Image: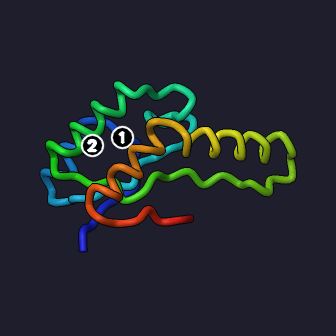
Amino acid sequence: MKLGFYTNYDEKTVAFAHKVGFRSMELSAWPDSSLNADKVTDRRIKEVKKDLKEHDMEVSALGYYPNFLDPHKENAEEATRYSTRYWSSPAGWMWMWSAHSRGAAPRSR
């Protein structure tokens, strides 16, 4: 079993996690995170993947947990839009790459 934790991605956090013995991270995928699906680029994802690989770190999951049933229709619609965008973005594919690179199927939430 590999222990990990939920965090926003940044190089210092990955280095810290590796140093203290973690080998897995659940990365934040919210719009205000460093892996914002509306802004993240293929180039940035390659940089993140390289950093994770250099630190022997796996991505256990991408964390985005909106309320799709929000009583405010605009909030629910934005959650659906962003979620759909996320899983078709380079960051969404980063999770697929990470899971398949270790022989595991992606978890559904």
Amino acid beneath label 1: Tyr
Q: In this view, does 85 lie to the left or right of 13?
A: right
Label 1 Cα neighbours within 10 Å, binned few <14 / some 14-19 / many ≥20: some
Place residue 86 in its image quadrant: top right
The percent coordinates of residue 84 (x first, y second) are 64, 44
Q: Is mark 2 on a helix, strand or loop?
A: helix
The one of 101 and 8 positioned closer to us in this rendering: 101
Q: Is residue 46 above or below residue 27?
A: above
Residue drawn where x is 55% and y is 45% of the image? 87
Q: In this view, does 91 lie above or below 7?
A: above
- What is the quadrant of the C terminus in the image? bottom right
Residue drawn where x is 53% and y is 65% of the image? 108
Q: Mark 1 points at which residue?
A: 9
- What is the quadrant of the N terminus in the image? bottom left
Q: In this view, does 80 lie above or below 31?
A: below
The one of 36 and 10 positioned closer to us in this rendering: 36
Which disc number belongs to residue 1? none
Q: Are circles 2 and 1 on residues that touch, CB within 8 Å? A: yes
The percent coordinates of residue 33 (x first, y second) are 48, 37
Q: Mark 2 points at which residue?
A: 13
Amino acid beneath label 2: Thr
Residue drawn where x is 29% and y is 65% of the image? 103
The one of 70 and 90 positioned closer to us in this rendering: 90
Residue drawn where x is 86% and y is 46% of the image? 72
Place residue 88 in its image quadrant: top right
Q: How many marks?
A: 2
Residues under labels 2 and 1: Cα distance? 7 Å
Way the structure is coloured = rainbow
The percent coordinates of residue 32 (x first, y second) are 54, 34
Q: Is residue 50 left or right of residue 107?
A: left
Q: What element carries label 1?
A: loop
